Image (spheres, rainbow, N blue to C red):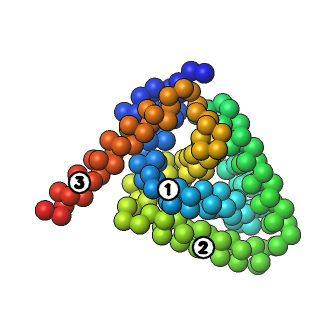
Amino acid sequence: MAKPSGGGGGGGGLLDLEHHFAFYGAYHSNAVNVFIHTLFVWPIFLTALLLLHLAAPSAHAAAAGAAVYGAFYLLLDRRAGALAALLCFLCWAASAALAARLGFSAGWKVVLVAQLFCWTMQFIGHGKRAPALLDNLVQAFLMAPFFVLLEALHKFVGYEPYPGFHAKVQKLIDEARKEWEDKKAKKMT
């Protein structure tokens, strides 16, 4: 499989998987943090779609949101992107079923509780490092579900978008973390 467009981690384009993964990975190198994100990122996505179903039930905003995410992941990596797109579709279907079953009043309460709990856990998981969304909101929101999926696929089945992907982005992550540590140390002096 060919490398993603942009090829390097030097701030490539929209479809540069190495760049996106390294950016997000630099904020999530602690195993506990990655585990917490793995548990809570997809429920945030699902309940965000539920919110769209409740707020604009006839506008198809939830379907459009799920389709945009799924298409983006497919463009980043065909194999893992197909799985991510399927998960996006399943989240859309589940959120539609929940919206129909719960209705507006109960649905909003579910969204509120789930979002508050999941986001609280996300922030707790970061410890001393601020979340990625504080530096790049769009990239953080777009990459979070795909990042945790790629991490789980790598951990459990050894998946890589192409041979050497994780070794290459780990170097980029290490560089970014060192830069952050240097800036942090400089501020303290």
* Element type where label 1 sits in the image: helix
Considering the image in quadrants, where does the N terminus appear? top right
Residue carrying label 1 = 31
Q: Is there a contact, CB below 8 Å, between mark 1 and mark 3?
A: no
Above/below status of 182 relative to 4: below
Given the image, on which type of amino acid does mark 3 rest?
A: Lys
Residue 19 % position (x, y): 44, 37
Residue lying furthest left: 189
> Badge 2: few (under 14), some or many (20 or more) residues near its Cα, within 10 Å?
few
> Badge 1: few (under 14), some or many (20 or more) residues near its Cα, within 10 Å?
few
Given the image, on which type of amino acid does mark 2 rest?
A: Phe
* Element type where label 3 sits in the image: helix
Residue 127 % position (x, y): 41, 66
* Element type where label 2 sits in the image: helix
Above/below status of 127 relative to 17: below
Q: In this view of the protein, which residue sits in the foreground, 98 or 174?
A: 174
Above/below status of 143 relative to 19: below
Q: Is residue 72 visible?
A: no
Q: CA distance from mark 1 to mark 2?
A: 20 Å
Residue carrying label 2 = 117
Q: Which mark is residue 183?
A: 3
Given the image, on which type of amino acid does mark 1 rest?
A: Ala
